[in-house]
Amino acid sequence: MHRRDFLQTGAVVTAGVVASSTLPQSLAIAEQAVTTQAIPKRKLGRTNEELSIIGLGGVVVMNNSPSFASKMVAETVDRGINYFDVAPTYDNAQERLGPALEPYRKKCFLACKEEDWTRDGSQKLLEEPLRLLRTDYLDLYQLHALSKMSDLEQILGSNGAMETFVAAKKAARCAFSVSPRILSKWR
């Protein structure tokens, strides 16, 4: 073995020994810093809602046990995260998220999506998440996966999903706002 190879190998081995002896302590310090720092929040548009810059997607609890979902939500809220997002397309995520979120519902901003452009279909898709999520309102109810101009025309047309959205807002079942300026571009 050449002197240079010996010194390089020795340095790597020494660094590894030093790192392995201090690694658990370093990880504990890093974990403590993460759990004690509050997640920053930002104002949502022109609303008074302050949302965490990181949210929990319901897909995380999909196909997991109710106890896993409860632990996940509790830890998420404890760390200052208040934005939760779910959709009917996330298999059983709404079923799991509903009971887990129930104790924290007043402190959380809950967003849900739907993909039916008709009034009747979107009404059904609004009722289901309210039931499964065990809440009487959604903070944000979104049209998901619009891909064609004809989708938007159907949504805004007679018997379109927008009728469901407007009725839900009037009934305080979801809080959302559609700018008249934006709507006027499509009509």
Image (cartoon, helix red, strand yellow):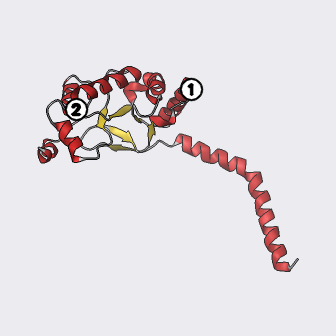
The quarter holding residue 106 reads top left
Front residue of 38 and 9: 9
| Above or below: residue 100 compared with residue 82 | above
Q: Where residue 65 is drawn, which disc sits there?
A: 1
Q: Position of residue 4 (x, y in %)?
A: 81, 78
Query: Counting other residues with Cα less than 10 Å from the Cα at mark 2, is it few (<14), some (14-19), or many (20 or more)?
Result: many
Front residue of 50 and 153: 153
Q: Position of residue 123 (x, y in %)?
A: 26, 25
Q: Position of residue 34 (x, y in %)?
A: 55, 44
Label 2 belongs to which residue?
161
Q: Residue at x 32, y 27 (%)?
A: 125
The answer to whether one can see residue 134 in this image is: no
First-in-chain label (2 vs 1)? 1
Horizontal placement of 82 versus 74: left or right? left
Q: Residue at x 74, y 56 (%)?
A: 19
Which element type, helix, strand or loop, lies under badge 1?
loop
Horizontal placement of 71 versus 141: left or right? right
